[in-house]
Image (cartoon, rainbow, N blue to C red):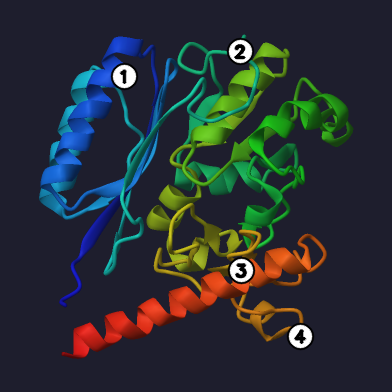
Amino acid sequence: MKSKNYKVVSLYCFFPFQGNLILDLKNKLLELENENDLSGLFIFASEGINGTICAEKNVIDIVINLLNKYADNRNLNIKVNFSKNKVFKKLKIKIKKEIVTMGVPEINPSDDNGAYIDSADWNRLIKKQNTIVIDTRNHYEVSIGTFQNSINPNTRNFSEFPKWVDEHLDTFLGNKESTNIAMFCTGGIRCEKATSLLKKKGYKNIFHLQGGILQYLDNIPKEENLFEGECYVFDKRVALDQELEKGSYSICHACGMPISIEDQKRKEYKKGIQCHFCIDQFSDNDRKRFEERQKQIDRLKVENHKIYKD
């Protein structure tokens, strides 16, 4: 079985997306999946499109052309990298209230958001004395890599971010009129929505990293790179290194937390059953279930290996 050179594209676009068109696009994408080797995850909502897809280049081109028609050729904020293996099992399409869940219906990122900062200008901005840098991602994403001297809100999910802003943001601001607030995330969608929230609350000098960490790592040479560690991604690769290749982390299949090579050497770690993050989270019955699931996974791997050899 020869591995393919898959193109992995992350994208998002905030725009008014009508319900009948959402269903129409969903059906067309599922037809494409039936006829092609297309996998990934899309989230559609009345505020736009968010997703990551994985396929060979010609299939990706078809999908992007289709999305452009529905988004009226607005900027899809595309980030590209490559993988020798599929990074999703199949194509999933979810229709939700928001393409990234914050839970603040009165904001509209397509109408009002902060200033985009490209990768080169980002380095200059975050080095300024009067700039605070905020990582808008979840705590487990921040734990494996972030920008130097950035603030970690320590949120479990993005819907906790507005509360953190209300309770903590002002403590990091010196002069509200002159302090720059620079925010970033994986691909740009969360920090863009976060800037919309802050503008609604009356904050000034608000910026967000265009294309997020993925675009930054693609654009900035290693010797100028201010991002430390690896970047968590929501697919089979778990994390990408500075060259946007699969990193050193894997996933605990019990709790879903990213675990390093060092974590896997800890006495608490049992593959597919538990890690040091979740050792107290599950019952003995749960762990027996996880153990049986891991045995089945291992058996399938052995069987597939035999088929491959034959």
User: Looking at numbered disc 4 in the image, what kind of residue is underneath it?
Assistant: Lys
Which mark's residue is nearer the viewer, 3 or 1?
A: 3
Taking the spot 23% from the left edge, 60% from the top edge, the residue there is 6
**Circles 2 and 1: CB distance less than 8 Å?**
no
Q: What element carries label 1?
A: helix
Instruction: Name which of mark 3 and mark 4 comes first in the sequence.
Output: 4
How far is the residue under mark 3 from the one under mark 1?
Answer: 37 Å
**Circles 3 and 1: CB distance less than 8 Å?**
no
Instruction: Name which of mark 2 and mark 1 comes first in the sequence.
Output: 1
**Circles 3 and 2: CB distance less than 8 Å?**
no
Nearer to the camera, 114 or 157 = 157
Label 1: how many Cα within 10 Å (few below 14, some 14–19, many 20+): some
Res 48 → quadrant: top left
**Mark 3 = which residue?**
290
Instruction: Name which of mark 4 and mark 1 comes first in the sequence.
Output: 1
Look at the picture and state if 30 lies above or below 203: below
The answer to whether residue 71 is seen in the rendering is: no
Which mark's residue is nearer the viewer, 2 or 1?
A: 1
How far is the residue under mark 3 from the one under mark 4?
Answer: 17 Å
How far is the residue under mark 4 from the one under mark 1?
Answer: 48 Å
Say the numbered circle drawn on residue 105: 2
**Mark 1 = which residue?**
22
User: Looking at numbered disc 1 in the image, what kind of residue is underneath it?
Assistant: Ile
**Mark 4 = which residue?**
267
